[in-house]
Image: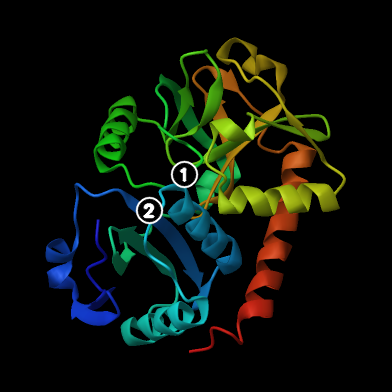
């Protein structure tokens, strides 16, 4: 859904009115994309998004070759022209076209962070999960399933019965001073997830890659989702399984992420100063 307050988009280096966006999109073409979160006008973890965007383009053998400095100047001008400080921006690249526009940002509430969220399982997969490719129809189907179930998110279970990731999130389980994840070839390498791994290492929290199965989730003490719009979001229940949202390891990660976030914004604010 588009943000009604946004006035301009960028299509192939030209600023256009947002009303022109449908004419610019191609819903049939393979579309590589990134969703970048702005906080106080700073694109959060920009370098990670840029690197993943390049990896996705290389994976589909795209003909698009981006000049980083030129793209960043255009991106900064986009932020200025729309006077947007706290929102999400989507970059879409398809065929030889580049589209940039603001999307509606849906962030968790304060109570979501304090009380955790309720999620469920669904037997489904993200095709080619390591590539950030836009799958509009799949996304609509998943949103409908989640809304009908009345949950915040659904964890995907593949044909082998393994828990992989959320429909638009990564997931970690916690036991003691360790966090547990599905193997990386089964999931999208989320930018927030990568930052969490850095924090976990700095805090001496061990990471284990395991075969996560639905029938074994009671073995864990706590769990959380992570994503660009969510940061670290505690899970209260997965179906009927209750988790400790006040688990010490989870609280260490959440507090350390907040400090990490503030440091990142401070370090990169000059580059993106409006």
Q: Residue at x 48, y 70 (%)?
A: 38
| Residue 121 located left or right of residue 46 | left
Q: Helix or strand or loop: what does disc 2 sit on?
A: strand
Q: Which residue is mark 1?
A: 131
Q: Which mark is residue 106?
A: none
Residue 55 image offset from top left, x and y in percent: 52, 54
Identify the residue shown where x is 57% and y is 47%.
Answer: 113
Q: Are marks 2 and 1 in contact (CB under 8 Å)?
A: yes
Q: Position of residue 24 (x, y in %)?
A: 17, 65
Q: Nearer the viewer, residue 157 or 149?
A: 157
The disc, 2 or 1, on the residue closer to the chain's N-terminal end is: 2
Report helix, strand or loop for mark 1: loop
Is 246 rendered above or below residue 197?
Answer: above
Label 1 crowding class (10 Å Cα cut-off): few <14, some 14-19, many 20+?
many
Tell which residue pokes out farthest to the top in this image: 215
47 relative to 232, above or below: below
The residue beneath circle 2 is 32
């Amino acid at each position: 859904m588009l943000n009604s307050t946004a006035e301009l988009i960028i299509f192939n280096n030209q600023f256009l009115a947002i009303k022109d966006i449908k004419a610019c999109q191609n819903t049939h073409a393979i579309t590589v994309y990134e969703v970048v979160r702005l906080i106080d006008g700073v694109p959060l973890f920009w370098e990670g998004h840029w690197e993943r965007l390049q990896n996705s383009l290389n994976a589909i053998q795209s003909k698009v070759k981006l000049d980083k400095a030129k793209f960043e100047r255009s991106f900064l001008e986009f932020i200025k022209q729309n006077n947007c400080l706290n929102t999400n921006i989507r970059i879409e690249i398809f065929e030889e076209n580049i589209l940039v526009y603001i999307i509606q940002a849906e962030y968790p509430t304060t109570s979501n962070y304090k009380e955790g969220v309720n999620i469920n399982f669904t037997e489904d997969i993200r095709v080619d999960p390591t590539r950030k490719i836009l799958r509009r129809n799949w996304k609509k189907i998943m949103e409908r399933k989640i809304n009908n179930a009345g949950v915040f998110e659904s964890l995907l279970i593949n044909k082998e019965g393994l828990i992989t990731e959320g429909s638009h999130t990564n997931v970690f389980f916690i036991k003691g001073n360790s966090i547990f994840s599905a193997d990386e070839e089964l999931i999208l390498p989320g930018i927030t997830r990568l930052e969490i791994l850095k924090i976990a290492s700095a805090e001496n929290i061990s990471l284990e890659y395991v075969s996560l199965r639905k029938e074994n989730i009671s073995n864990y003490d706590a769990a959380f989702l992570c994503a660009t719009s969510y940061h670290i979001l505690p899970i209260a229940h997965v179906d009927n399984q209750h988790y400790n949202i006040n688990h010490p390891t989870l609280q260490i990660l959440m507090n350390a992420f907040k400090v990490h976030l503030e440091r990142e914004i401070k370090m990169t604010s000059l580059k993106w100063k409006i």
